[in-house]
Image (spheres, rainbow, N blue to C red):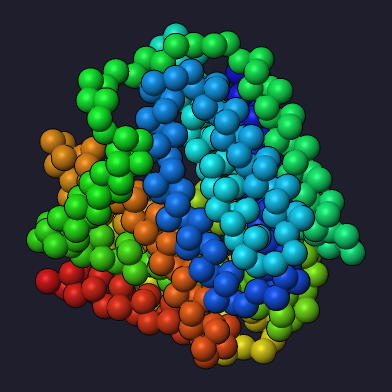
Amino acid sequence: MLIIYLLIALDVLSFVTNLAIQTKHVLLLGGSFFAIGLLGSLSSLLSVVWRPIAGHLSDQKNKQDVIIWCLLLSLFGNILAWASPSMWLYSTAKVICVANTAVQTLLKTTVTDLCASDEESSKVFNKLGAFNSIAFLFGIVLGSHIADYERGIDYAYLLIISNIVVSIGLVKTLPRVDSKGTKHDDKDVGLIEGALKEVQSVYIDLKKLVVSPRYWDIFTIHLLIECGFFMYYNSSGLTLRTQHNMSEKYIGYLITLIMVVSVGCRLVMSKMKSKFYPTDLGYLMLWHSTLAEALAYLTLALTSSLAVFVLAMAAVSCAKTFIDTALNNLLLSRTEASEKGIVISSFDNVVSVGQVLGPLLAGTVSEIFGIRSSYIVGAVFMFVGSQIANTQRTR
C-alpha cells in the first residue's frame, strides 16, 4: 500500500500548490475577482459531472488505465495553463485539469480491489485519512513558500508537472486487478448521459429532502452554511493578498496555524459538548455556533486590523467545527435506518453544491461591491441559519 500512500501525497501536494498560485496567476493574466469565483464554481461543477464518468469507465476497464489517462489529461492541462498568455486559454487549461479530481476516488476503489477484506480496507482508509491531512499541511507550507518567489508560478508548475510524471510511473507499478463492478447490459447509454443522470439523481434527492418535513431544516441550514463558508474561503486569501499585502509564504503559515486550531477544537469537542450541551440534540450548539460564525464574518468585513482579521479567521474555523458536529448529531438522530444511505450521501452532496455556488456568489458580489461584501452576504446566510435553528429548538 506504500504506492497508494505516495500517490495520495503527490496528488494532495499538487492540489495545494495549485491553490497557492492560482489567484496570483489569474491576477497576472488580467483576471478579475469575478473570474476567480467563476473558475472555482465551474471547476467544482465539472468535477461533480466528471467523477461518475471516471467511475463508470473504471467499472468497464482497468482502474489503473483510467487513472493514467486522468493524470495525462491533468499533465496536458497544467502545461497549457503554465504557457497560457490569456485568461481564456488558462480557463480552458483548468477545465482540462478537472480530469485529475477523480484520481483520489479511483485510488480508493483500487484499495478495495487490493485488500482481502472490508476490515483491511477500513484500516487502510483510516491511515489514508491521517496521511492526507499531514500531506495537506506540508503542501500548504511548501506551496506557499514556492509561490512567494519572483518566479514562483514557474517553480510551482514545475513541481506539479514533476509530481504528475512521477505519479504516472507509480501507477504503472500497481497490480492490474480486473474491476469487480457489475457489467452494464444497456450499451446505448453513453458515459456523459450516465453522468448527467447521476447529477440529476443528486438534484432530485436533495430537492426531496430539502422540502421534507423531517429534514428540511437540517438541509436548509447546511446549504446556507456551506454557501457562506465557500464565499469566505474564496475571499479570505484574496483579502490578505490585496488589502493586507501578505505574502504567499505567510498566508501558508496562517492557514496551517488555523488548521491546527481546528484540529484542537475537534480534540476538545466531546468535553465541551458534555459540559455545555449535555442534553442538547444539536439545535442549541448549532444556534450558538452559527451566531458566532456570523459575527466572525461581520468582523472580517469591517475590520482594518490584520491581527483582528486573523483572529476572526480562527473564530470561523472553530465555529465551523462546532457547526459540523451539531449538524451531524441532528442528522443521525433524525435518520431512519432504512434511509441512511440516501440521506447521508445527499447530506454530503450539499458540500458540492456549496463549492459550486459559493465562489460564484463571492466573485459576483466582490466585483460589484468590493471584496469585503462577500463576508456580509455570508453573515446574512449564517443569521438565517441560526434563526431556523433557534426556531426549531424552541418549538
Residue 338: x and y in percent read 13, 36
Residue 71: x and y in percent read 62, 35
Image position of 202 with respect to 254: above or below: above
Q: Residue at x 54, y 42 (%)?
A: 99
How many marks on residues?
Answer: 0
Residue 200: x and y in percent read 25, 50
Q: Report whether 123 appears left or right of 97.
A: left
Question: Going by the picture, which residue comes out furthest to the right?
Answer: 150
Quarter of the image holding residue 39? Answer: bottom right
Image position of 101 with respect to 378: above or below: above
For the residue pair 318 and 30, the one nearer the viewer reads as 30
Question: Going by the picture, which residue comes out furthest to the front?
Answer: 188
Tell me the quadrant of the picture where the N terminus can be found. Answer: top right
Q: Report whether 212 appears left or right of 101.
A: left
For the residue pair 10 and 26, the one nearer the viewer reads as 26
Regarding residue 31, the answer to whether it shows in the image is yes
Q: Residue at x 67, y 42 (%)?
A: 76
For the residue pair 335 and 366, the one nearer the viewer reads as 366
Q: Residue at x 43, y 62 (%)?
A: 356
Tell me the quadrant of the picture where the C terminus can be found. Answer: bottom left
Q: Residue at x 84, y 51 (%)?
A: 155
Residue 342: x and y in percent read 22, 42
Regarding residue 145, the answer to whether it shows in the image is no
Image position of 323 with respect to 110: above or below: below
Q: Report whether 92 appears left or right of 291.
A: right
Image position of 305 with respect to 31: above or below: below
Quarter of the image holding residue 371? Answer: bottom right
